Amino acid sequence: MLTILGFAMIATFLVLIMMKKMSPIAALVLIPALFCVFVGKGAKLGDYVLDGVTDLAPTAAMLMFAIVYFGVMIDVGLFDPVVRGILKFCKADPMRIVVGTAVLAAIVSLDGDGSTTFMITVSAMYPLYKRLKMSLVVMTGVAAMANGVMNTLPWGGPTARAATALKLDASDIFVPMIPALLVGLLFVFVLSYVLGVRERRRLGVLTLDEVLVDEKAEVKVEEKETETVLVGAGSGNGKNAGNGKSTLPTGGAGSGTDADEQDDDFQGLDPHRATLRPKLYWFNALLTVGLLTAMIMELLPIPVLFLLGAALVLTVNFPHIPDQKARIAAHAENVLNVSGMVFAAAVFTGVLQGTGMVDHMAKWMVDVIPGSMGPHMALVTGVLSLPLTYFMSNDGFYFGVLPVLAEAGAAHGVSPLEMARASLVGQPLHMSSPLVPAVYVLVGMAKVEFGDHTKFVVKWAALTCLVILGAGMLFGII
């Protein structure tokens, strides 16, 4: 019964958010609460929720201060050179923009943290997608898949969990998987190209002149409307005053503005924003490298590192308290949205684990595996990693399910290393799971409905996982 209710609860949640009948926060809270009552354990709902909140509180703290830290780093211009290079490649071609999104997300994912990857990628690419009227779910989908492949890095989480659960060395799991993961990443780039070509056919290819002239015309219309509404208001109060105008060229098409100047103007991040701190660039760069190094070496818990880093970067870059308050306020919406989602997800995971639903679901899936599949348990594990890592946390899968699967595989001569490698296959799909806090950073900053993102990305992410699994089998890794 718990197995059926567990699957029913997950299905109800996904259907309601994809049909936009409930917001993700409401669905994450109310649906598990209702099913907890169905199970007959409504009296223990409070305990389950508090247990879930306790488990996810460090993650919420990490995300809160990571958003502030990397938000400030984006403000002060740390990532502008990388972004500028990607944007120079992209220009106004939808195909290049989608491919550039995948490349940027893959590069930034080297830090092992999905939230920072999504913050930097969306901050850089969102203005381009909006300006060219491109599909924002393409951006979120491509970024999530690229990050999902890169999430298998030893310091990303899943590999370390698999190594810990099966008492193996993380490098022995990861290094042989590199060829298969590279094939998966290449597939994401090819898929980005295909999706980009589809966007190009839908929108056409614009020149920088056309995009900038169109934008300038829109700005003039908006300014006129603003002046009509705000009679007598100063120019500083206009809707497009400040940062909005700085992205436009000083002259329109045909005014003598050359291509290089237009490239400088066509930026995802305003190159003239008041928060830039060019004199502190190397300090910020070294601080970030030091922070990421400390994360990889596990010198301190990640929430503590980001808490210290956020406090330090605010103090050094913005020594005046009003400026610090302004920076915190600028990123408060993202902080609130993400932390709210995390604590709402704590209700969902708390009920799943507290009622025993997740244990019964995992046991049922292991029991239904035919005995004849024993010698192919690595393949079975790779396939199961798709739904299981999507419907439960990485901790639940790697510490609860993988050891059981590995034991079944060992009885048929399948090594734990093969099982561990196969368990990594589902990560491109896992990164869009409603139980992954980072995905709410992605859809929140991109202003995309979670249901729309899910409907778009699931099929492509699942296909990416199967490509990695196929490559692993072809190379004899799995």
Image (cartoon, grey):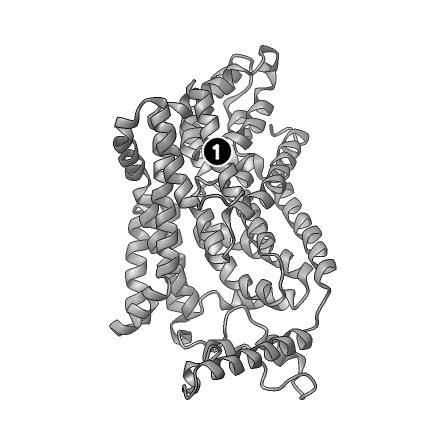
Work out whether residue 8 or residue 147 is closer to the camera in this orientation and state it. Answer: 8
In the rendering, at what x and y percent does residue 362 appear?
46, 22
In the rendered image, which quarter is residue 343 located in?
top left
In the rendered image, which quarter is residue 242 located in?
bottom left
Above or below, 332 against 404 in this view is below
Left or right: where 391 falls relative to 354: right
Work out whether residue 267 or residue 175 is closer to the camera in this orientation and state it. Answer: 267
Q: Residue at x 64, y 76 (%)?
A: 214
Work out whether residue 380 or residue 293 is closer to the camera in this orientation and state it. Answer: 380
Q: Which residue is mark 1?
A: 12
Left or right: where 30 falls relative to 17: left
Mark yes or no: residue 262 visible. yes
In the rendering, at what x and y percent does residue 345 appear?
38, 40
In the rendered image, the quadrant that contains the N terminus is top left
Q: Secondary structure at mark 1?
A: helix
Instruction: Specify the amino acid type for callout 1.
Output: Thr
In the rendered image, the quadrant that contains the C terminus is top right
Q: Residue at x 36, y 42 (%)?
A: 344
Above or below, 55 against 372 in this view is below
Query: Label 1: how many residues lie within 10 Å, few (<14), some (14-19) or many (20+)?
Result: some
Above or below, 199 against 55 in this view is below
Q: How many marks?
A: 1
In the rendering, at what x and y percent does residue 120 appear?
48, 59
Q: Residue at x 49, y 50 (%)?
A: 110
Q: Residue at x 66, y 83 (%)?
A: 258
Left or right: where 47 falls relative to 8: left
Mark yes or no: residue 113 visible. no
In the rendering, at what x and y percent does residue 168 appear?
44, 28
